[in-house]
Image: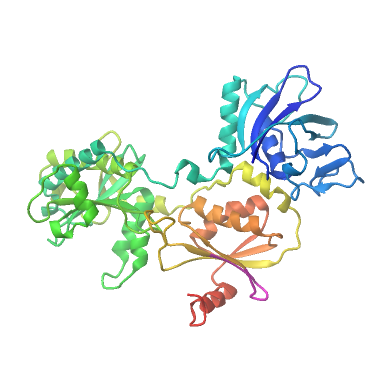
Amino acid sequence: MVFQVKISIKDIERPIWRTLIVSEETTFEDLHIYLQIAFTWPDTASHLFLQGDVRIGSEIEDLFEGKETLDEEEVTLAEFLKNIGDRMTYINGEDDSWWHHEIILEQKAELPMDLPLPFCFSAEGNSLKDKEFDMEYNLESMTNEELVEYINEQFSEFYDDSFFDASEETEPDEEEWNELFDAADQVKNKKPWLELYDDQLIAIWSNELHDYAYCSIMGNAGESYGVTCFLGSRGLLSFFDIMDADPYEDNPALLFNQYSVTVDFNNREDLDEEEYDLIKNLGRKYRGKYQWPSFVSMVPDQLPWTINQEECLILTGILLKLDAFLSNTENLSEKVPSFGGNMLAINENEELILLSIEELIDEALQEPVLELDISEIEWKRMRKKVQPVNGKEVELALIQMGEPVQNTPDSRPFLPYILILVERETGAVLHYDLAESVYYAEGVQQAIYQLFDKLEVLPKTIYMIDDFFAVNAEPLFDKISIPLVKTDELEGVEQFVEMMMSEDGPF
């Protein structure tokens, strides 16, 4: 059941109100957050809900001190808004500025579809910049329609991504596929592998990527033919990891840390069924050895997969620029530097320049200035936990599992991580859970944030191995004011992993 509630600010000359659609199971804690967002009230304000003699609020609020107050985390709207027309009061403010809101239940209905909740149905009055209001946060003047759109954009932080099919990657359409095949065929016909080795990278500026793609031409050894485009700084570092590795050592981490898109030129029998069906459905004709194109996406923590629409457009643009360069260049082996000090590049103005490989590596290895990628809405939920606590020192680690999993039968397989939290003094396991790809900063931060959201008490100090995960998690700990200690060893985590991998363990 969903509720349509209208919330109006009382005792003001002009009308300011919001009509929201929310679940009947919405807690008053959640409703408070929704109203803060809908009216842009500052997070520092105190608040309370009233209905008759009943008071509902947070344990940390001091409004009406001495009065018994129900815990807003435990009470839902359905318990107090039972009939159409039922009313409540919401008080929000600080110091001597208190704003009273009237909440009216206007409609009750069964949810006819998977409407994302909460949802702003209508609104009026958004300019809070007048002498009636002295607020830190204000909305610029908007029409009512723009105001509703703005509020729902803020509410989108609550929505399940699956509602928008965000987890489903968009496939290239027929025209985009054909443009990619055409570009690949043009490069193939130039046979650049007759003059270049796979370590003679050509950097090509990608307008779609807004960065360089580092192209490795494969085929000089006569074993496999194609072009692998390592994308941006992450891709370049993954290329150098491959170059530094022992060619005789089986190292799956190299495969799962690549960030690239590739066109391979295969024999017919080397294509899988989907690749052959794609060529057939596009009406394209190929004959002979090493003539049949296939396209592969490599993303860290995920298995090799067919390219999506975005990657298709990126690869098409790169191959077209590569083909233009090959068409206008003689004596490739002389023009493209051997692996070493410099790299030939086609910059964003399509000029040929030389880039210093040492400078590229130094730039790629620089620790980025990371901003915390957690929304303000999520911080509102965490706010009450960011209090002085008597937590314990803990060890935190993310350990990658060896077996890939899928969210759905057709989705791209990925290698999940085990997120482990261990009490440092006793070695007791406080929590462990699975997390999806955490290769990027936002993935690390989200995984740890979700862990903290489940804990009743936050740790006093956190120990992590001094690596990529610690670097990307540090802004999160700074925001919560929890000290992070980077170390070379986590004894409690190591014991847990040994137990998990033992014969008696679950893995």
Seen from the viewer's position, the closer of residues 478 and 81 is: 81
Placement of 157 over or under 301, stated as above or below? above
Tell how many labels.
0
Rendered image quadrant of residue 64: top right
Question: What percent of the width, then of the height, locates residue 436?
Answer: 48, 57
Seen from the viewer's position, the closer of residues 32 and 340 is: 32
Question: What percent of the width, then of the height, locates residue 449?
Answer: 60, 54
Seen from the viewer's position, the closer of residues 98 and 351 is: 98
Furthest residue in direction right, as rendered: 66
Residue at 40%, 53% in the rendered image: 362
Query: Is 399 left, or right, of 479 in this rendering?
Result: left
Color encoding of the figure = rainbow
Residue at 46%, 62% in the rendered image: 416
Rendered image quadrant of residue 208: top left
Q: Is residue 351 shown to the viewer in this render?
A: no
Magenta span includes 42? no
Placement of 110 over or under 362, stated as above or below? above
Residue at 68%, 67% in the rendered image: 393
Q: Is residue 360 shown to the viewer in this render?
A: yes
Q: Quadrant of the N terminus?
A: top right
Seen from the viewer's position, the closer of residues 436 and 223 is: 436
Query: Is 84 left, or right, of 377 in this rendering?
Result: right
Question: What percent of the width, then of the height, locates residue 480?
Answer: 67, 52
Question: What percent of the width, then of the height, locates residue 367?
Answer: 48, 53
> Magenta part of the protein: which range?
419-430
Furthest residue in direction top, as rendered: 13
Rendered image quadrant of residue 252: bottom left
Residue at 81%, 22% in the rendered image: 11
Furthest residue in direction bottom, as rendered: 503
